[in-house]
Amino acid sequence: MNIYDGIHFLAEILFLILQVSYFICKCTFKIFIPISKKSVANEIVLITGAGHGIGKELAIGYASLGATVICWDINKETNQQTMKEIKIMGKQRVYAYQCNVADREEVFRVAKKVREEVGDVTILVNNAGIGIVKKLLDHSVDEITRVIDVNIMSHFWTLRAFLPSMIEKNHGHVVAISSVAAFLGVTHGTVYCSTKSAIKALMEAVFNELCAYSKGKFLIKFTTIYPALILTGLVKKPRIRFPIIMRGLTPRKAASLIIDAQRQNFQERSIPSYWLPILYLMRIMPKKAIYCIYDFLDIGADVED
C-alpha cells in the first residue's frame, strides 16, 4: 500500500466514524424530540388481516386520516364488517377483498384486481399472522406449514405483487408486523418465533438490496414493528411474572402506535417503545446471562387446552 492509498484509507475510516456518530446522534435525538408525522391522505393503504384485531384497527385508523383503505382477509364476513364500520364513519374510499395471503397465486390474482379497480398500493401493511402454542414435536406438519405460510411466506408474495410499482414511482412504504419474540425464541414458540425472526431479516435484506442498487437514492420506506403483548386473543394463556413490564395493550392502542411509527418513518419500533433498546442490549450479552434474565422474568405462554 503506497502513501496515497494509506491516506485514502484513513480518510474512509474517518468518514465512517463521522457517519456512525451522526446516525447515533440522530437516533438519540428521535428519542427525546417528537418527530413530525407525514400525511397519509390520498395514499392507498393495503392491510392484510384486516378482518379483526390490530388489522381492523389499522384500517379504521388509516381511513380516519384520509387514506384510501384496502382490506384483505381470508374471512370474507369479518372483512366486509370492517369495511362497513369505516363507511358508517363517513369514509367511502374503502374496499374489501377476500384473500388467503398464504396462497401465492391468490395473492397475485387479487393484487391484479386491486390495481385495476383501485390503483397502485403506496402503503403495504403486512399484518396477517397466526400462532399455535405447542411444543415443536407436538405440532402437526400441516400446522407448521400453515404458520410459516401465513406469517412469512405471505410477505414474499405481497412484496412481489406491490413493490414493483413503488420502485417504478420511487414512492411507497412497507410496514411489517413482527414481534418481540423475533429476538428470543421462547418455550412453545418454536415455529412462531422463527417466522417473526424471518420477518426481521427479510425487511432488513430488502431495504439493503434496494439501497445498494439505487446507490442510496430510493425513497421507499420500510418499518418493522415488534409488538409485545397485544390483547388480540392470539395467545390464550400468556405467562408473565411481572405484568407491569409486559402490560397488554388493546388492538386500537397498538394500531395507533403502528400508524405513528409509519408516519414518522421509523425503520424499527417496538410496542411499547422501550422494549427495542432492551432487546438489542440483551443481544450483546452472553447467552447464559440472557437465559438467566429470561428465567427470572418468566415470560412466555402455556400450552392451550
Image (cartoon, helix red, strand yellow):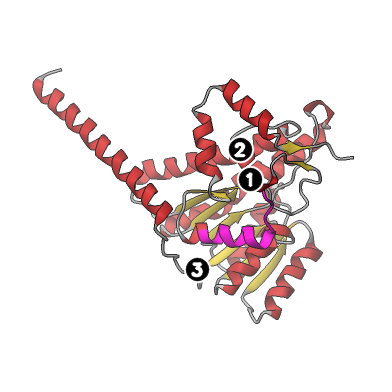
Q: Identify which amino acid the numbered label 3 is placed on.
A: Val
Mark 2 lies on residue: 182
Q: How many marks?
A: 3
Mark 3 lies on residue: 40
User: In the rendering, at what x and y percent does residue 87 appear?
Assistant: 69, 78
Quick one: quadrant of the C terminus?
top right
> Which callout, 3 or 2, points at the residue further toward the start of the chain?
3
Mark 1 lies on residue: 245
Q: Kindly state the secondary structure of the residue where label 1 is placed.
A: helix
Q: Identify which amino acid the numbered label 1 is placed on.
A: Ile
Q: Relative to 193, does residue 77 appear above or below in the rendering?
A: below
Quick one: quadrant of the N terminus?
top left
> Which callout, 1 or 2, points at the residue further toward the start of the chain?
2
Q: Kindly state the secondary structure of the residue where label 3 is placed.
A: loop
Task: Give the dominant element type of the magenta stretch: helix, strand or loop.
Answer: helix
Residue 190 lies in what quarter of the image? top right
User: In the rendering, at what x and y percent does residue 293 appear?
Assistant: 62, 30
Residue span colored magenta: 246-260
How far apart marks 3 and 2 lie (CA) works out to 28 Å
Q: Relative to 42, does residue 199 appear above or below in the rendering?
A: above
Q: Residue at x 64, y 42 (%)?
A: 152
Could you tell me if the residues under marks 1 and 3 are in contact, i.e. CB atoms within 8 Å? no
